[in-house]
């Protein structure tokens, strides 16, 4: 058999050497490194230079949309979110290189909204505290002004002049004001009477003052206020001559009869009579009148003149005492 020289034109090599071999595609692909080693490999490859993607072939086109499959996949991926500091630098770089949002990442609008809300809440708190402080100061100043401006009528307890029988007008009674915790009015439903309660003290002889008018009551300002422990002491006139005062015949009120005291702030306190007595004017025990008949409840004690007149004076020889307890 003759020996022939083998060349590239030899039929033995037909359909083999000259057949175009399928090339490996290094087009742009979505890399999803799973390990830190894969991340390092991708980083080194990117430093070496950009890799030109091959042209999309007919086989890589989407059958319905007519677009490259890789482009469609990129459109379906989630948009990148700015990555914030992560506790683990390696994990943070892995998220950043693959456009995967970090679990700790937040959008800037959300952070600005939270910061603005916190500033608004803090400002509202400061405003509320300032309003409360100014309101308290205003109330305190009003109470002091009321206490200083509430002047008692001239004292009629000395007995050297008769009390006034002039009735106060309805407007004067309606516009009468006291500090919020002081007694403002007293009502005796059995007598259908309502009177102003004036703040009184003691006179130069250390005796309890009485209102100048027979239609007003006087609250001893050193006794308890409505609803407080102890007893509130209120006095009034029984009358002058044939003109009856607000406490006329209070000794005839039955046990259990109600007496109401309206405070400066409008709160109503109701008391029920539990005891009555008539004593000589010189034997009145003021200490007893400042104590409630039921020490577990606030008390209200009333005192007025009764009996015959003292010669040469406008006072009576006896005192009618009424003891009531808050219901």
Image (spheres, rainbow, N blue to C red):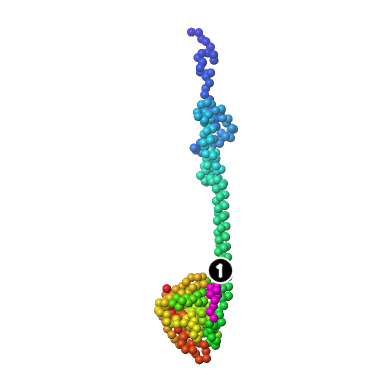
Residue 278: x %, y % from top left: 43, 85
Q: Which residue occupies 56% across, 33% down?
A: 45
SS type, badge 1 = helix
Up the image or down, 214 lies above or below 268; here it is below
Q: Which of 230 and 211 is in front in this view?
A: 211
As drawn, the residue found furthest toward the top would be 1
- Does the magenta-highlighted stretch encompass residue 76? no
- Tag 1: Cα neighbours inside 10 Å, few (<14), some, or many (≥20)? few
Principal secondary structure, stretch drawn in magenta: loop
Above or below residue 27? Residue 163 is below
Say which residue appears at 57% left-offset and 68% top-offset: 138
The percent coordinates of residue 242 (x first, y second) are: 49, 85
Q: In which quarter of the image is the C terminus?
A: bottom left
Whole-percent x, y for residue 103 in the image: 51, 44
In the depicted view, which residue is nearer to us: 14 or 286?
286
Q: Mark 1 points at which residue?
A: 139
Q: Nearer the viewer, residue 50 or 40?
A: 50
| Residue appearing at x 56%, y 68% in the figure | 139
- Write the start and end of the magenta stretch as one range: 166-178
How many numbered discs sit on the rendered protein? Answer: 1
- List the single residue furthest toward the left: 255
1 over 205 or under it: above or below = above
| Residue nearest the viewer, comparing 149 with 283 | 149
């Amino acid at each position: 058999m003759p020996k022939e020289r083998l060349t590239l034109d030899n039929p033995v090599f037909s359909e083999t050497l000259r057949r175009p071999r399928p090339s490996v595609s290094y087009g742009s692909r979505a890399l999803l490194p799973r390990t830190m080693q894969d991340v390092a490999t991708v980083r080194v490859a990117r430093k070496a230079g950009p890799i030109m993607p091959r042209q999309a072939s007919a086989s890589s086109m989407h059958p319905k949309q007519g677009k490259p499959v890789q482009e469609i996949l990129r459109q379906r991926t989630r948009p990148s979110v700015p990555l914030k500091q992560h506790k683990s630098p390696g994990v943070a770089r892995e998220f950043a290189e693959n456009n995967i949002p970090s679990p700790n990442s937040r959008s800037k609008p959300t952070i600005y909204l939270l910061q603005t809300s916190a500033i608004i809440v803090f400002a509202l708190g400061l405003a509320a505290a300032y309003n409360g402080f100014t309101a308290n100061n205003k109330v305190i100043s009003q109470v002091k002004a009321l206490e200083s401006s509430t002047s008692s009528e001239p004292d009629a307890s000395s007995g050297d002049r008769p009390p006034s029988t002039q009735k106060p007008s309805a407007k004067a009674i309606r516009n009468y004001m006291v500090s919020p915790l002081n007694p403002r009015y007293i009502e005796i439903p059995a007598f259908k009477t309502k009177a102003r309660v004036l703040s009184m003290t003691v006179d130069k002889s250390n005796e309890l003052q009485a209102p100048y008018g027979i239609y007003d009551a006087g609250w001893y300002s050193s006794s308890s206020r409505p609803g407080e422990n102890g007893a509130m002491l209120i006095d009034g006139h029984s009358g002058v001559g044939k003109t009856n005062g607000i406490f006329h015949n209070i000794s005839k009120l039955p046990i259990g009869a109600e007496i109401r005291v309206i405070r400066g702030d409008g709160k109503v306190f109701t008391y029920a009579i539990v005891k009555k007595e008539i004593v000589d004017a010189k034997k009145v025990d003021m200490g007893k009148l400042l104590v409630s008949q039921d020490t577990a409840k606030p008390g209200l004690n009333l005192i007025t003149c009764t009996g015959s007149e003292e010669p040469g004076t406008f006072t009576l020889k006896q005192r009618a005492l009424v003891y009531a307890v808050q219901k």
